[in-house]
Image (tube, helix red, strand yellow):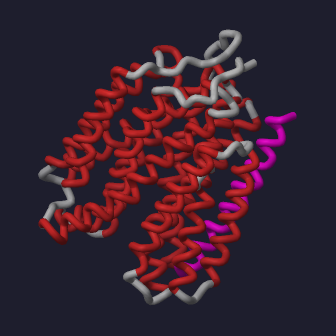
Amino acid sequence: MYALSSRRAPAFLPAFSALMFFVGFEMGGFQFALSSISSAFSMRSTGAGLLVAAQYSSVILMPLLFGRISDRAGKRRVILVFSVVFLLGCLCSALSRGVFSFAAGVFLIGAGYSVCETSGSAALADLSPEYGARWVNISQGALSLGAVISPILTQYGVNAFGWSWRIVFLICLVGTLLSLVALFFVRYPKPQTTQKKAVASPRSFLRDIPFILFFCSILLYVGLENGFGYFAESLFSQELGAAAFGAYAISAYWASMAVSRLVFGVLSIRPSRALVASLCASGVLFFALVLLQASIPALVICAFIGFAFGPVWGSLMNLAAERFPGSSGGAMGLMSAGCGLGGALFPALMGILSDFVNLRAAFGLLALAAIAAATLSFFAARMQRS
């Protein structure tokens, strides 16, 4: 059983949130600068997609390998080491002179941020089943805020001062270095449990039905995130005839998600309820987006989708970690592998549907995936309470 824990957020939370801000800054900036990067290296769309895949390949592998290590060696060591990995990835990407060195850089970035994100979230989830999800949502709110600011700041710098796309990675480099100093000196949270839990074996995760359902849900959810993120601009330019609205749609999406995560980080709402309701709402919103013919209502729907997505990642991660109190790092590492799989799979599926049917059919896939994720999460949460 968990001991009664204080409502006061741990001192680790601000330092970890600062790191997550720069992780979000890299995410939003990389998405914004992808076309410029591919042009700089004389690459076509397929090559640009492979650069994204290079980052997500490490998101699949690294948390899976190091999640259980963080349970044994301590989350502090793992977070510090992989903060350095993220920093080196930013340095390599900023200074790259060829596509292979850039791909190596984003591979290191994916490895660094994914392990830090899962280990830090596991450290927060260890503290309390009641407040852990709220603190994870706050850290994810910081990530979303970074993703909102990055494209806006980068676009301003490019237009006003002639900045290169490399500025995204240089800013992340400096910000991560400052965050690393804070993470080195801050006190890390310890699990508030009344008894020591053994580290679970890999088979334990695969035998736990609720955990498997949560894993499938997060695979679908991150697929929704990436499917929307990489095709929203195409929807506005190709289907709605409003190319200029594409960038606004992505910014509105990230901004609403940031607000939502911060709101759910403050409100006392059961994570399972927030999770199922949010996924159901996002399914309805995606269906509406498929049907709409006007750009401004579609822009509003994109903002609502971001708000609906807000508590999903943190709730899924926290609920999965609750299944294995002594192995939260391993549980979140496996969940993060699901994130990488979904993030790589859905853009490919949407691209195929767009080419062979149309883009609205691809967004219809997202609507169905959201309803499927809501259904799986509902049954998983019910089994968790029983």
Q: Is residue 270 visible?
A: yes
Along the viewing direction, whichever of 261 and 376 lies nearer the viewer: 261
What residue lies at 29% left-to-right and 27% top-to-bottom?
A: 181
Measured along the vertical axis of the image, is residue 31 above or below residue 247?
A: above
- From the top left corner, tell me how far across and down residue 251 is, in percent: 43, 66
Q: Main secondary structure of the magenta part?
A: helix
Q: Is residue 348 visible?
A: no
Along the viewing direction, whichever of 348 and 17 lies nearer the viewer: 17
Q: Quadrant of residue 81?
A: top left
Along the viewing direction, whichever of 204 and 137 lies nearer the viewer: 137
Q: Quadrant of the N terminus?
A: top right
Is residue 367 shown in magenta?
A: yes
Left or right: 288, with 242 as reference point? right
What residue lies at 23% left-to-right and 62% top-to-bottom?
A: 37
Magenta-drawn segment: 357-386
Left or right: 43, with 30 as reference point? left
Left or right: 8, with 142 as reference point? right
Measured along the vertical axis of the image, is residue 298 above or below residue 269?
A: below
